[in-house]
Image: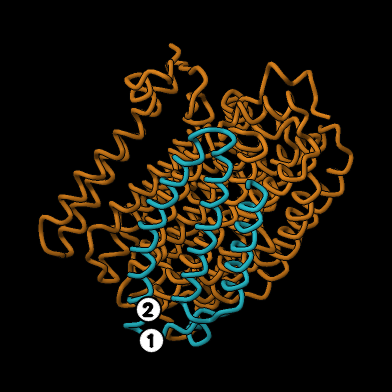
Amino acid sequence: MTFDLSIPSQLMQALTPELVLMAGAMILMLGAAWKSESAEHQRRIGYGSIGVLLLTLATVLWFNSRGLSSGPGVIAVDGFRFAADSLFILGALGTVMLGIEYNGREGIWSAESHVLVLFATSGMMIMAAARDLMIVFLGIEMMSIAVYVLAGMNRRSPRSAEAALKYFLLGAFSTGFLLYGIALVYGSTGSTNLTTISEHIVQYKLGHQSMLLIGIGLLLVGFAFKVAAVPFHMWAPDVYEGAPTPITAYMAAAVKAAAFATFLRVWRESFDLLDFAWLVPLWWIAAATMVYGNVVALAQRNVKRVLAYSSIVHSGYLLVAIAAGTSSGSAAFLFYLLAYTLATFGAFAVVCAMSRAGDRDLEITDYEGLWRVRPGMAIGMAVCMLALLGFPVFGGAGFWSKVYVLAAAEATPFRHLVPLTVLLVLASVISAGYYLQIVRVMFMKPRPEGAPDPAPMGTMTRVVLAVSVVLVLLVGLVPARVIGWARENQPAPPKALSAAKAP
Amino acid sequence: MLAEALAISAVLFTIGVIGVLTRRNAIIVFMCVELMLNAVNLSFVAFSKLYGATGQVFVVFVMTVAAAEAAVGLAIIISIFRHQETVNLKDINLLRG
């Protein structure tokens, strides 16, 4: 069915998945405040959050299966939204599951930590649905404000507080750029609706209007901050290191996915016809991100920091998919996000299980000889590292995700993307230096004398690791089906106008 | 009128950006961020004279969000002050490579 978004009741129906999640989160928030903080209450609210997330996931999948669409309006009802939503919910599920056991160990008894993940996820779902820059802004802020708090959730740790401060200041700073970009785009096109913007750009031949171009540039800066692309990445390693590990996983996977999903929708639905004026800065950002992130990652000794730089690097790869700008680029983008989310969660599940109270044992040297004491963890970590590297067969989905991005970039009519694909391959080769390093110390080094055995994994952590690893390998076996799913679910470029190009 | 309002907004925004980049007190940095947001609000109001109410609606949203952000931000600054007894960003450097 087609929703008429100008009728409030139909707009509400179109937003059902978000409303389910928000209602559940509010009830749980009341529940969290009902009793005083305790380990048991924290766990109970965590289980409740998992329940609400599963319910939302079911709603999203049900909506997706009905083949819904919508008329013009502030939100989109399409496959891309629901596909992105399912990724965010998977990420949130992983976070809450890791969080329940991590919080128990670290003595973080505030039950709100799980509920805030739900609030942040509802912000992400709004972002994926937004077809109006106003809603984009609201979604980003709903997500960001909750994640600022989550980064500082470990109140006893000065490092966590510092991470929260840095994330907050840089996040608010980037919001300023994003907003100014929105203001200038609104000023030059007279609308905040993505579809109307693209129509007006064509109709009034705004392709070379300087206010619009400055606005787009500022939007690009704002989004580059949110996805931690070089040179707007400096907050990421510090914040990722200081934040509680499950929240780091959430930031590396879901927050990044949400920022990218909005980025892709805004770019494809509004500025697709703009003669690619934005392509040059995007090209340079992608190139700098891939090269710089990889080189600096080689020098890191802390596993969380390695994964932080790895997430910066993967932003670069994803930017290549966005720069391709075609529908196969969007499909590769979605496939990449799926593979990246799974591999990241698997890796962070191991990091969570390895670290002991107080977040110690996070150096690469602490992983030496892990194979001998905890073979399951070592194998899981190895698969995730190989997936992030893009290794064939053993890296499963990671390999195919890079293949699809490269194929999409090669197939575009713009020849200047070819150097970018060469850079992507070279960058992947450099990244072997740190991904394989972790695999090497786990399998080939002896366990150092007197090194304590890591505690056995909790049930939840084990489930997160097992599911991620199995899915990574499974998707690697049937990539064609998954890329088919990604092809069906992508943002709609302005159809009626694609014949007429902006001047 | 529009040109003047936009020029003032651009100047305010730039002052805010320079403030964020040069000042080292967390509270002042935060104030500069608020200055940036309010500069943007000025642009929105100026544009809404041309295009109707959308810009003004946007301003209401921005103010609401800025208030929520201030609540969270000040709480974070207080929590860091409890740990470190300072809000000077130069002295807050536990996390570094």
Name the foreground residue: A483 vs A468. Answer: A483
Q: Is residue A262 above or below residue A6?
A: below
Q: Residues within 10 Å of mark 2 (few under 14, many from 20)?
A: many
In this rendering, position of residue B61 left or right of residue A364: left
The reply to whether the C-beta atoms of the residues labelled 2 and 1 are less than 8 Å apart is yes
What x and y, as percent, mark residue A269? 64, 30
* Colour assignment, chain B: cyan
Residue wearing tag 1: B84
Rendered location of residue A96, percent (x, y): 33, 52
Helix, strand, or loop for circle 2?
helix
Disc on res. A29: none
Residue extending farthest left: A35
Mark 2 vs mark 1: same chain?
yes
Query: Mark 1: which secondary structure?
Result: helix
Where residue A309 sits, quadrant-wise, is bottom right
Q: Which mark is residue B80?
A: 2
* Dot 1 amino acid type: Gln
Badge 2 amino acid:
Ile
Number of other residues with Cα within 10 Å of mark 1, as a class: few under 14, some 14 to 19, many 20 or more: some
